[in-house]
Image: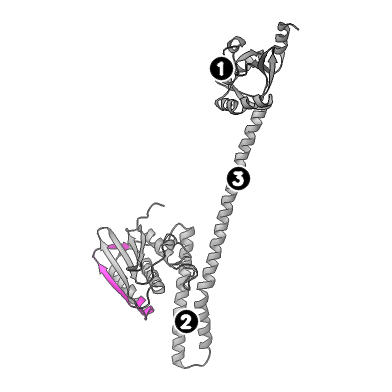
């Protein structure tokens, strides 16, 4: 068959057919391939290399995989690449190549097919995989959220069963004893126990409601108005001293001027911080409640002596259901006091901080900023 006849056959082929030197320089290219890249054969033969018509990724693949494999194996098949058209567009192709001889010369024969449908399928497959990964991530997020809610619900049940059980049991026992015919003095003591247990149960229920409001309602509600901070703190300390007759609780005031806040909530803060000091402080040491007013605002601080709070507990100290004791100690239990203190401070636009060391004891400080909410 003559060279012209061979060329006609190659040009009529429904695929791209090329012959190159081992370094990729074109020796021949049929009409179909020239149409794909927008060059005529004269612009390719002896002037361009096959890898010059590949995308950047294709050139890297040609250098690191194509050339070594072809040299070792003598052929490669079904390699997907992208050709660059002269107008800047790309043509996805699947190509086969083999080492051949042209007389004494070593050459590479290449056959290529347009793979637009395959390329579209692969892109859709990649997109589907990405969507699947996103769905898996969203499912995991929802699962973690549901698990967190379940854990939160379990903790709430733990609070109710642990903390409310004792005062309610006291009320039930005292009520049963009152039904009996006992001396008047005994009845008075039972009534006092019922009153105290009921008050404690009521406070715990209030704490639970505050926790629910803070977690689900966006924060604890406060009513900001002018208050006499020093008088409020002094009266709160007086009541707390009666509630804890075995402990010495002292009030100190600094500065003067107007303070704005929610009186009942601030009494709750003082009560929670003093209760914390009673539970974890040194039993024979004084507890000091300091109310301060200065140019920067108002603050309430509660100090007690005793063991320092372990450093590893400080980051989570104001989270719900945590306490200032390491796990395994006798004082460890669920708790909401410090969480509510922080939420009340935040509702006043303030901050809550703690300093604790064996030498100086532990001080909780709550600052107030007139009720302007900080950014969430």
Pointer 3 residue: 135
Residue 357 position (above or below residue 109) = below
Rate crowding at label 3 as few (under 14), some (14 to 19) or many (20 or more) other CA atoms within 10 Å: few
Numbered disc 3: secondary structure: helix
Q: How far apart are marks 1 and 2 (CA)?
A: 93 Å
Numbered disc 2: secondary structure: helix
Pointer 2 residue: 194
Residue nearest the viewer, comparing 101 with 47: 101
Mark 3 or 1: in front is 1
Give left or right: position of 148 versus 275. right
Residue 318 seen anywhere in this rendered image of the structure: no
Give left or right: position of 313 versus 100. left
Q: Distance between the residues labelled 2 and 3?
A: 55 Å
| Residue 68 quadrant | top right
Residue 307 picture location, percent across and down: 39, 70
Residue 69 picture location, percent across and down: 65, 27
At x 26% / y 69%, what residue is drawn?
253
Rate crowding at label 1 as few (under 14), some (14 to 19) or many (20 or more) other CA atoms within 10 Å: few
Pointer 1 residue: 86
Residue 268 picture location, percent across and down: 39, 68
Residue 356 seen anywhere in this rendered image of the structure: yes
Q: Does the magenta stretch include residue 154?
A: no
**First in sequence: mark 1 or mark 2?**
1
Boundaries of the magenta span: 240-260
């Amino acid at each position: 068959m003559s060279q012209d006849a061979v060329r006609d056959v190659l040009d009529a082929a429904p695929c791209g057919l090329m012959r190159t030197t081992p370094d990729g320089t074109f020796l021949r290219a049929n009409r179909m391939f020239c149409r794909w890249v927008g060059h005529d054969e004269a612009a390719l033969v002896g002037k361009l290399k096959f890898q010059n018509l590949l995308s950047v990724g294709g050139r890297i693949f040609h250098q690191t995989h194509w050339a070594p494999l072809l040299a070792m194996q003598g052929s490669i098949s079904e390699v997907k690449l992208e050709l660059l058209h002269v107008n800047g567009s790309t043509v996805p192709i699947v190509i086969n190549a083999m080492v051949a001889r042209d007389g004494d010369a070593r050459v590479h024969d290449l056959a290529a097919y347009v793979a637009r449908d395959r390329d579209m399928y692969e892109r859709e497959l990649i997109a589907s995989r990405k969507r699947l990964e996103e769905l898996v991530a969203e499912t995991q997020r929802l699962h973690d959220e549901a698990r967190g809610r379940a854990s939160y619900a379990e903790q709430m049940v733990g609070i109710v069963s642990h903390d409310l059980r004792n005062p309610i049991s006291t009320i039930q026992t005292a009520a049963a004893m009152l039904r009996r015919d006992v001396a008047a003095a005994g009845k008075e003591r039972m009534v006092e126990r019922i009153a105290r247990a009921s008050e404690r149960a009521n406070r715990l229920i209030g704490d639970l409601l505050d926790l629910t409001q803070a977690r689900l309602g966006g924060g604890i509600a406060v009513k900001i108005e002018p208050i006499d901070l020093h008088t409020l703190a002094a009266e709160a300390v007086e009541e707390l001293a009666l509630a804890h007759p075995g402990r010495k609780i002292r009030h100190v005031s600094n500065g003067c001027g107007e303070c704005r806040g929610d009186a009942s909530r601030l009494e709750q803060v003082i009560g929670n911080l003093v209760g914390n000091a009673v539970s974890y402080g040194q039993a024979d040491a004084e507890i000091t409640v300091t109310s301060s007013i200065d140019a920067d605002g108002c603050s309430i601080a509660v100090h007690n002596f005793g063991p320092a709070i372990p450093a590893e507990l400080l980051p989570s100290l104001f989270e719900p259901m945590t306490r200032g004791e390491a796990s395994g100690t006798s004082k460890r239990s669920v708790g909401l006091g410090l969480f509510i203190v922080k939420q009340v401070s935040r509702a006043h636009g303030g901050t809550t901080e703690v300093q604790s060391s064996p030498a100086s004891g532990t001080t909780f400080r709550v600052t107030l900023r007139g009720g302007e909410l900080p950014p969430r």
